[in-house]
Image: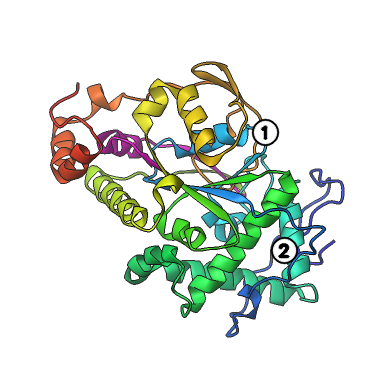
Amino acid sequence: MSGYPLLDRPTNAARPSGPVSRPHILRRRVDSWSECGPAPLRSPAMSPQRPKVLSIVGSARSGTTILGNILGEVEGVANAGELRWLWQRGLAERRPCGCGLPPAECPRWSVVLDDMRRRRLPAADDDAVAAAVDTVARTQREILARRNRLRAISAAAGRDTAWEALLCQRAVTVDVCTSLAEASGASLVVDTSKLPHLAALLAGAAEVDHYVLHVVRDPRAVAFSWQRQKALPVANGMATMVTMGSVASVRNWSKASLAAELLRRYVPRDRWLFVRYEDFAARPEATIDRALAFVGVPAPGPFVTPDTVELGINHTIAGNPNRFRTGSVRIAEDDEWKVRMARRDRTVITAAALPLLVRYGYPVRSVA
């Protein structure tokens, strides 16, 4: 046992029969960055070759969750889900992993967390571990602050060595990916966080072999999806995901697209793959085969027919509630917006996103 409720797990990796203690409140901040420094090196006998990491970037509601889940079914691939939320939603809030357990009790993530504790904070007490988790979450917020986003993306070049928050976040993220690859026996880790600012951390890290998959969906479809209410599992039951109006949605879609385009300037051509959601939905098996070839994974996708996959229980952090779907899942385009979206919303979004619509090959005139 780790001695810290946030990281404790049953030794048999099963759901505990008694009550689970609640995580401590993150009670204090730290002024030192020692918790985020490079972890002790693994011995040569224990160290695998540097893991491959695929960062999926793009706007929310673009099919990234199902893409990640399909890739995660492939032999040698571990889908982390939205790794950005491990610290806040996974540890602090104890929201469930894709397997239904909080990460600290999950048979996969508990191994990763225990490994990181042993290597980074072997003699730490509860308060020190809580402070370290708080530090990682705090540095992530600093990197994602609006004033720092351009600097964060440019860090993909690997030249920014003076920004302590970035160095902390990069070191810890690399360590999580490496530990996850070892715990799952995978050669490729998939991160569906979607944020180019965080993908840039790994793009500038020499310790991983990094790739980027940029997924784009028609912004009118994205906006229509944001208007739907979806049930979301949380630590104490169910909640409802936030909804978003058309103006806010197209603004966020444009920001995500432009940030991805900026990141692309720092990533080698052979490490960048662009996929439209609509093309994936039309040819899912071919798209997954293309993605696997892109990252050099010589294994077939989990397809039982060209448009149907067989999904098992996964171990993903956060993401669309659809990540909990298992069994046979047919992939098809969700194009309800074409007949149900209000004309005014369609006009506003088309006008606001016009340059990027053209760039990504979407029709400008009515597609109903």
The disc label shown at residue 75, or none:
1
The residue at the point 22 percent across, 47 percent down is 247
Q: Nearer the viewer, residue 347 or 38?
A: 38
Residue 186: x and y, percent? 68, 43
Q: Nearer the viewer, mark 1 or mark 2?
A: 1
Helix, strand or loop at disc 2?
Answer: helix
Q: Residue furthest bottom?
A: 31
Expressed as whole percent of the image width and height from the top left, the position of residue 94 reads: 63, 54
360 displayed left or right of 35: left
- Element type at mark 1: loop
Q: Which residue is drawn at the image coordinates 74% and 49% (left, top)?
A: 183
Q: Is residue 339 magenta?
A: no
Q: Which residue is mark 2?
A: 116
Q: Position of residue 143 (x, y in %)?
A: 43, 68
Q: CA distance from mark 1 to mark 2?
A: 24 Å
Which residues make up the magenta segment?
214-235
* Of residues 258 and 17, the one drawn nearer to the viewer in this rendering: 258
Q: Position of residue 28 (x, y in %)?
A: 61, 79
Q: Amino acid at mark 1?
A: Glu
Q: Nearer the viewer, residue 271 or 119?
A: 271
Reply yes or no: does residue 227 show up in magenta: yes
Is residue 144 at all visible to an observer of this figure? no
Q: Eyeballing the image, is 200 above or below 128?
A: above
Asked if one can make out residue 310 in the rendered structure from this viewpoint, the answer is yes
- The amino acid type found where label 2 is placed reads Met
Q: Residue at x 14, y 30 (%)?
A: 343
Task: Work out whether 336 lies above or below 228.
Answer: above
Quarter of the N terminus within the rendering: bottom right
Query: Residue at coordinates 31% horizontally, 52% vertically from top-left?
Result: 261
